Structures are given as C-alpha cells and as structure tokens.
Amino acid sequence: MPAYMRTMLKIENLTATVGEEDEAKTIINGLDLEVPAGEVHAIMGPNGAGKSTLSYVLTGRDGYEVTGGSATLNGEDILDMDPEERAAKGLFLSFQYPVEIPGVPVMTFVRAAMNAQRKARGEDEISAPDFIKKSRELGQKLKLDAEMLKRPLNVGFSGGEKKRLEIYQMMMLEPKFLILDETDSGLDIDALKTVSDGVNAMRSPDRGMLVITHYQRLLDHIKPDKVHVLAKGRIIATGGPELAHRLEKEGYDGVLGEVV
Amino acid sequence: MTTALRALISNPNTAELELIARYGMQPEDPRRERLFQAFAQTGLPTRRMEAWKWTDFKAALGALDRPGSQSACDPLASDEALCFRFSPDGFEYPKDLPEGIHLFVKPEPQALGSAEDVPLGALAAALAGSKTRPGTLMIEVTATDLPRLHFAFGGEGEASFARVTIVVRPGAELTVSESYLGGAGFLSSVFEYSLQGDAKMNRTVYQRGADKETMAATALVQLEGESEYTQTSLAFGAKLARLETRLVHKEADAKATMNAAYLVGKGLHADITTHVRHGAQSCVTRQMTKGAVLDGGTGVFQGKFHVPRTAGQYTDADMQHKALLLEEGAVVFAKPELEIYADDVECAHGNTCGALDGDQLFYMRQRGIPERTARALLTEAFIAEALETAGDLKDILRHEASNWLAQS
C-alpha cells in the first residue's frame, strides 16, 4: 500500500473530560476521525465545540482525561504516552497562544527539542554547524532575523512573530503529523501568507495535517482535502472544501440545523 | 573568666561549652574578650531572636563534630587569582603580592565595629587566631587592574573561624571571591569590606555544604564617597548555611548591587540575609534574590532597607525576591522589609513564591523536551538573572547551577 493511502491519525469513539473529578465536564463525546498520510483535514466548529480540547487531548496536556475510545498514530496508541513521547513519535501542535519561555533563547530551545526527540528515537544528535545552517535558511524563508532567534522564545514577540516562530519550529523539527490550532488568529494578511506558505511547504505524501479553525479564511491559503464539522464533541458533518464555503455563507446554525 | 562567661550564656548547650573552652585556651587579650562577650550575650543564635527565627544555630549545632569530608571542589579557584586557603587548622596565603595589595597578618583580633548585631561575626573574630591561623587578616588595596583575591574555606575538622578586613582606598578597584566548600562541622567567617572614595569592588560568594555542617558567612560592608559595590552569591545550603550581608551607605552617592541565588535540596537549608542602611543621601541599592527549592529543602530570604529621616533622603532602592517551589514539601520563608523615615525616596520591593508554570512545561514537552529537562531549563533561566552581576565568574556560577539542576 502506498504511504499516502495509509491512515496516520485514527481516532475512534473518543470521549474526554476536562476538570477535577467532581466537576469534570465531557467535552469530547464519541469522536471518530481518520486522517491518512498526505492529506490535510480541516476541523471547523463553533466556539465551545471542543476544537482546542481535541488538540490538547491528542498531545497529552494535563487536566484532560480520556474516558473512552482510542487514538493511534501510525498504528501506535498515543493516549498512554507522555507529551514528549508523542512529540518524538512525530506529533506537533502549533499553539493558538504560543507560550513565552523566559531565559531560553529560540535556537537553544529548538536544538534541545530536536536533540531530545532524536535521542528518544535512538538517532544521533544534530551537529552544531548543521543546525545553524538549517536554522539560518529557514529564518530567511520565514523573515525571522538572526537576532530574533537569539532572544528568549516568544518573550516580547508580537502575535504574528509568535506564529511565525511556531512554523519555524515545525519546519526545524519536521514532524510527521501536524495539528494547527487556530493558526490564523491574530495574523494580518501578510503574516497569514507567510505562515500558510510555510505550512504548504510542509505538505508531503508522508505527512498528515489537522487544521483547526473558526474561519474559512485560512482554508483559502491552506487547501484542505476534507472538512469536518465538530459540534458538541463529535464530528457531525464531513465534506470537501465546499463545506467550508457553505459554513462561511450560511453560518454554523444553518448548516448544523440541516444535518443534525 | 570562663565561669563568668558560662553564666552569660543561658542554658549553654554542648557546642557553646566547647566554644567557651576554645576561648579559654586563647591568650588573654582585651579585644578578644570584648568580642567574645559580644557573642556570649546571645550565645548561638536561636529562633527566639527575630533575625534568626528561621535559622536556629543553637538547635542545629548540638556539639562540635567532624562531619567527614569536604563537600565540593572549588569552582572559583584559579591560577590567575591570589588564593588564600583556610582550613580548620591551617592557613595558606600567597607570598608574592603585586604592587597595590598590602597584606598584614595579625596574630591578635583587632577591634570590631558593629559586632553587637552579628553574634556569629563576633565569635568568628574572637576565635579566628591560633598557632597556625591569623587573628585578623588585613588587606589594603590601592590600585586597579589587580588579580582577583580568592578566599577558600575547606578541609576537615570540627570548627573553622576566620576574620578578614579589606580596605579599598579611593580610586582602587578589586574583585574578590569567597568559596565555602564544607568539611567543618561549624564554620563562621566575618569579612569587613570598606570602600573609600570612588573605589569599586565586585564580590562573589559560593557556598556548598552537607547535612552535617552548619556555617555562617558574615560580611560587613561600608561604602564611602561615590564607591560602587557589587555582590553575587550562589548558595546550595548545608544543615544550616547563612550568608549575611550588612551594608551601610556612609557617604552620598554610593551604589550597591546585591544579588543572590539559592538552590536547596533535601535536608538542606540556605539563608540569604541582608541589611542595608541608607545612612547618606542619594545612595542607590539594587537587590535581586532568586531561589529554587526541592522537597525537604528550606530557603530563607530576609532583606531590610533602613532609610533614616534626614540622612536617607533621595534614596533609590529596590529589593526583589522570587522563589520557586520545585516540589511539594519544599519550604521557603521570606521577609522583605522596608523601614523608611525619609519622605523623598524611591523604595520598592517585591516578593513572589510559586511553582513552575504548567503552560510553559507543557509547551516544552510538546516539543519533545522531557519533563525533567524542561524543569531544569526553566529553573536555570529563572535563577540566571540573579547571577548576571558576577562578572567573569558568571559562567562558572551558571554552570554550577546547571549541574545541580541536572543532578536533582
């Protein structure tokens, strides 16, 4: 079977809660989803549908408890893994709100991440000259100047710069599967184009992507193979790119009212 | 004499009786007597004394014992520095000194200025002298571009006392460092630094110890003229370890920067105590203390700015203390105090205590950095700010902090 027909991410009947035991709220409620290698799938949905929760459950953030179902990446169950193990398996989340890491320069951070992942996979560390060469090339492509990459990660950076740094990290780490959580939020048109170009450059027959977004706008730049609508913790509609346009035109109520 | 002193210390414990015996073996000297009496008024400090309520030497130091071996190698030792080595029974010092450094090795204790407030400083001064060790080591500095003066305290034994007095004359500049490496059951040192005219000094203190050692390093600093004093401490704690600095701005426009970091593991205790008196107008003090403590460790920060009504006018002072509780069971006590009587001053202080940020940890782990490494990187970055002032020794201190984090 060619790589691009292989299912990379497979989620079956997933349920997950957020919060402490007594007040745990079910946010993901019987979700099924399959993303094959080589494809880009978009997840759209209204506020509170569980979009960000899905990205956190898949990447293993504390405070989110899986109460049923399964999620596998390339056939391996990821739900029992620590976040860093999932990262080493090639799972990458581009954060909606990238976190400031004071005192740790961008390049130091990315090199530590890259070498930790390589170590976990039993690979050799990247040499300093190779790392610097790769970083410099990418920096130019993403319009990140060299000084910026020496500053502490995300500290004092604008919203657009933070998102470009997410793409920089993604391209440096070359993950197998990407989750982009609201990557377009806080971006002006030029930054949106730079970021989308970066994401599009990552498209490959060996790589899968899940693009989580509110708006159809991002999908004009990153053309999805499939669009899923997430509401009340489940995928309730799936279609081609045209579904995103319908949602934009008719609103979630219009479309959801029809399919539910 | 000895009997009278015994009566002075209320309910002396074994350690105090041994200290009295040590004093009794010293040749009689009125200056020593005054110093020992200053100590005997309180005896070993206890929690009943406000300034020692979290660092109780009397309780921790039941008797004078040999703890075993020295805890650490000396990261600050260097061929380029002039090294003075103190051990419980010995003292070595460089015989060839460059022009601009004048050394006086005095067998007797010299009179001490403000002993009343620092019982362990008075004790150190009273008991510093012996056949092999000077009662007072006096150093006068009259030049710039001098090699660093390094004072190393190591070697095994029951107790180690030292007293060093350094005067930096107008226009002179000096870099000094002190390493406390453990090995003595009880150590007390007192350094008196006096900066005159527009003298400049950069002092670095490194402390490491084990859970059977108690130590106190006291510095009494006087700033005159437009002198500039910078201090950076890195403490890893011991059964009890106290780094205390008492600084007085004596003349207008003096400037002091006092930073410290403490990293404390299980069974250890590190205490950073500072007292700054703005006794002259328009003086500046900047103070940043950062700490990180593991389960079973204790960190203490006590800082005080005292600004008198007329003398302290136009003071500009800032005190920050920030601590990380790395694990459940970590303990930090903090008491930042501003005592201000002048009405035209800028004084600020901040004090925070908390855990590492969960969002930051998750972000790093999502990128593949294991939790332990993520914690170490975040903690090192947090601590690093306080070590920035250590000049050429900054990287060594940072490396020491980083090693500790990697191993804990």
Image (spheres, grey):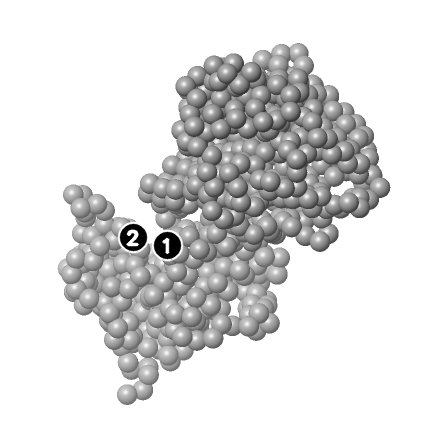
Residue identified by numbered label 2: A62
> Disc 1: which chain?
B
Q: Position of residue B366 (x, y in %)?
A: 38, 60
The residue most toward the bottom is A1
Amino acid of disc 1: Phe
Q: Position of residue B295 (x, y in %)?
A: 36, 44
Which numbered disc covers residue B362? Answer: 1
Residue at coordinates 60% horizontally, 40% vertically from top-left? B89
Q: Secondary structure at mark 1?
A: helix
Q: CA distance from mark 1 to mark 2?
A: 8 Å
Q: Label 1 neighbourhood size at 10 Å, few (<14), some (14-19), many (20+)?
A: many
Q: Secondary structure at mark 2?
A: loop
Please tell me how many numbered marks the rendered image carries.
Answer: 2
Q: Position of residue A98 (x, y in %)?
A: 43, 53
Residue at coordinates 20% horizontally, 58% vertically from top-left? A66
Amino acid of disc 2: Asp
Q: Is residue B226 above or below residue A226?
A: above
Residue B49: quadrant of the picture: top left
Q: Is residue B382 above or below residue A40?
A: above
Residue B145 seen by the camera = no
Residue A118 seen by the camera = yes
Residue at coordinates 73% horizontally, 52% vertically from top-left? B80
Pointer 1 with pointer 2, Cβ within 8 A: yes
Q: Is residue A82 left or right of residue B157?
A: left
The residue most toward the right is B99
Q: Quadrant of the N terminus of chain B?
A: top right
Q: Nearer the viewer, residue B37 or A126?
A: B37
